[in-house]
Image: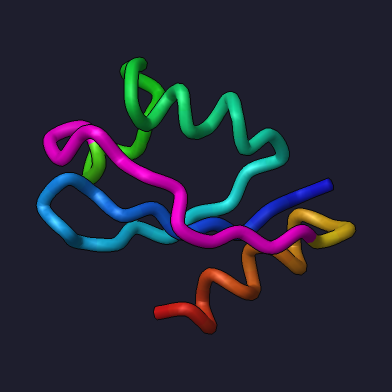
């Protein structure tokens, strides 16, 4: 399963991304260096929305629609 997700950063801004493992990606955003550069300076982040898709391409298309 692939997911499009939206997180809310500590400063109230939103970040949209895609992943194939939500729990691993949230951990990366909040703890690791593998999180998006944008969210590293705005921790902690909170998952506010996600939607599952069968393919990576479908999930990535939704990111474009979210912006």
**Vertical arrangement, residue 60 with respect to residue 22, above or below:** below
Query: In this picture, which residue range is highlighted in magenta?
Result: 40-52
In which image quadrant can residue 60 be found?
bottom right
Return the x and y of residue 44 as percentages of the image width and height: 24, 34
Toward the viewer: 47 or 66? 47
In which image quadrant can residue 12 be found?
bottom left
Single out the residue that lies furthest toward the top.
Answer: 32
Return the x and y of residue 30 as percentages of the image width and height: 33, 26
| Residue that appears at 22% across and 45% down | 38
| Residue that appears at 53% across and 83% down | 65
**Vertical arrangement, residue 19 with respect to residue 57, above or below:** above
Return the x and y of residue 67 as percentages of the image width and height: 40, 79
Q: Is residue 50 magenta?
A: yes
**Vertical arrangement, residue 3 with respect to residue 27, above or below:** below
Left or right? Give the position of 61 relative to 12.
right
Left or right? Give the position of 53 relative to 19.
right
| Residue that appears at 75% across and 63% down | 57
């Amino acid at each position: 399963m692939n997911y499009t997700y939206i997180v809310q950063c500590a400063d109230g801004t939103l970040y949209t991304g895609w992943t194939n493992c939500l729990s691993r990606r949230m951990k990366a955003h909040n703890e690791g260096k593998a999180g998006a550069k944008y969210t590293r300076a705005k921790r902690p982040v909170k998952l506010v929305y996600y939607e599952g898709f069968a393919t990576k391409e479908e999930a990535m298309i939704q990111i474009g629609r979210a912006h």
